Image (spheres, rainbow, N blue to C red):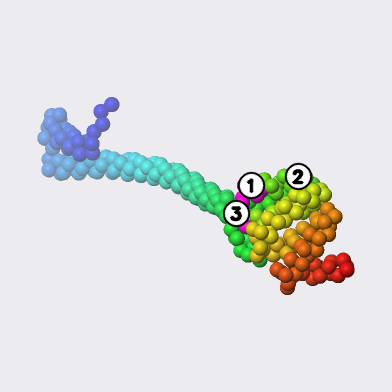
Amino acid sequence: MRIFSKSTLTAALLVAGSFAPLAHAGMFDDDEARRAILDIRNKVDAVNARLDSKADKSSSLSLADQSEQLNQEIAKLRGQIEVLTNEVANTQQRQKDFYVDLDNRLRKLEPQKVNVDGQEVSIDPNEQKSYDAALASFKGGDYKGATVAFTDYLRRYPTSGFAPSAQYWLGNSYFAQRDYKNAIAAQQVVVRKYPDNPKAADALLNMSSSYTESKDKVAARKALEQVIAQYPNTPAAVTAKERLGNQK
């Protein structure tokens, strides 16, 4: 179907109006001609009005449709933006949690500063765990297991801040098993290697006990005298004096 523009229709009507009188046998007079022209103009105006009305309605409908489509696209984009924003926020939170967890794990693997026998030392987490496990065996009455655990600890961590304590408890583990020879040897290491450690005086006391159980009273007495001489201002020295008094 062919579509004509408003200007085309207007021109067509004017031409039709102009040539219409030629179809009649006679000529119009001036009044008739003016009336005919006015009538044609009125018809053209009416057609133009109808065309304008249709164009306006079509334009309005078109704009309304476009506006609705745009609103739908905007709503869709806003939804996508909200989804992406949430995803970004969730990703950032997961990354934050990951790095916090990683930092905590790394911190657990790093040496920690702890106070051992009055001194601050750096202890690896595995050192601490192994020492605690060995000491737990001793306190739980598993003296044989404690002996193995402390021996292994000293082999693996010979320079550990817990080494003097591990050596001391190794001697006590032997003593608890009535292995006095090894108990004395273990405590001698404490006295010789760690003379300034607070456990050195107690190690001498334990040596004296081992000598006493081994029926070596002379060695037992010398150990007590050594406690008093080397560590006079300690609780161990007080105990040594009491034991010496009881031997008289």
- The overriding secondary structure of the stretch rendered in magenta is loop
Total labels: the figure holds 3
Q: Three-letter amino acid code at disc 3?
A: Thr
Residue 118 appears left or right of 206: left
- Considering the numbered disc 2 on the image, is that residue within a helix, a strand or a loop? helix
Question: Could you tell me which quadrant the N terminus lies in?
Answer: top left
Q: Which of 91 and 17 is in front in this view?
A: 91
- The residue indicated by pointer 3 is 159
Q: What stretch is highlighted in magenta?
A: 153-162
* Other-residue count near label 1 (Cα within 10 Å), few / some / many at <14 / 14–19 / ≥20: few
Residue 220, by quadrant, is bottom right
Whether 19 is among the magenta residues is: no
* x, y percent for residue 202: 75, 62
Q: Nearer the viewer, residue 211 or 231?
A: 211
- N-terminal of the pair, mark 2 or mark 3, is 2
* Other-residue count near label 3 (Cα within 10 Å), few / some / many at <14 / 14–19 / ≥20: few
Q: Which residue is drawn at 75% across and 49% down?
A: 182
Q: Three-letter amino acid code at disc 2?
A: Gly
Question: Could you tell me which quadrant the C terminus lies in?
Answer: bottom right
- N-terminal of the pair, mark 1 or mark 2, is 2
Residue 235 appears left or right of 163: right
Residue 219 appears left or right of 27: right
Residue 111 appears left or right of 211: left
Q: Which of 22 and 122 is in front in this view?
A: 122
Whether 156 is among the magenta residues is: yes
- The residue indicated by pointer 1 is 155
Residue 145 — which label?
A: 2
* x, y percent for residue 147: 74, 47
- Considering the numbered disc 3 on the image, is that residue within a helix, a strand or a loop? loop
Q: Which residue is drawn at 74% across and 66% down?
A: 226
The relative height of residue 143 versus residue 21 in the rendered view (above or below) is below
